[in-house]
Image: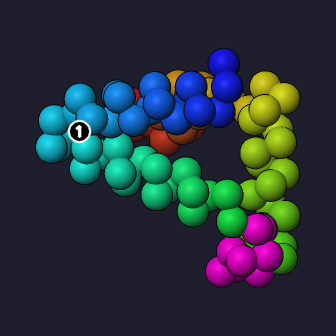
Amino acid sequence: MTASDIKFEILKKIDSLENNQLEEFHGLVLNFLNSQKEENEWNMSEEQRDGILSAISEIEQNKGISHRNVMSKVRSKFSHG
């Protein structure tokens, strides 16, 4: 599929969206484009940025802990009774 084919398909899908879907899609596109900024444009310290990048890397390597497991541990640690 060529770049032109991809653009045409995207435009057809955009054209068929209802107004509320179009607004949501617009937000998603802006979020995506904004996330593509250079890391040095982030408004945080180098230590914070490195921590986030490290966490992303761990998640991509399936080294994360699921929300369910975290919540289970918290509930068992702090449950009364």
Image-quadrant location for residue 34 = bottom right
| Quadrant position of the N terminus in the picture | top right
| Quadrant position of the C terminus in the picture | top left
Of 27 and 81, the residue lying toward us:
27
Name the residue located 82 percent from the left edge and 38 percent from the top edge.
58
Name the residue located 79 percent from the left edge and 76 percent from the top edge.
40
Residue 44 lies in the magenta stretch = yes
The majority secondary structure of the magenta stretch comes to loop
Q: Where is residue 20 in the image (x, y as percent from the top left)?
A: 16, 43
- Would residue 73 be seen by someone viewing this image from the given angle? no
**Mark 1 Cα within 10 Å, few/some/many (few <14, many 20+)?**
few
Name the residue located 56 percent from the left edge and 28 percent from the top edge.
6
The image shows residue 38, relative to residue 68, as above or below, that is below
The image shows residue 65, relative to residue 48, as above or below, that is above
Secondary structure beneath dot 1 equals helix
Of 45 and 40, the residue lying toward us:
40
Seen as rendered, the residue at the extreme top is 1
Name the residue located 37 percent from the left edge and 53 percent from the top edge.
27
Residue 18 lies in the magenta stretch = no
Q: Mark 1 points at which residue?
A: 21
Amino acid type, mark 1: Gln
Left or right relative to 10: residue 42: right
Q: Give the range drawn in magenta.
A: 38-45
Q: Where is residue 64 in the image (x, y as percent from the top left)?
A: 74, 33
The image shows residue 54, relative to residue 61, as above or below, that is below
Image-quadrant location for residue 67 = top right
Of 7 and 58, the residue lying toward us:
7
Image-quadrant location for residue 37 = bottom right
Q: Position of residue 3 (x, y in %)?
A: 65, 33
Left or right relative to 75: residue 40: right
Of 40 and 11, the residue lying toward us:
11
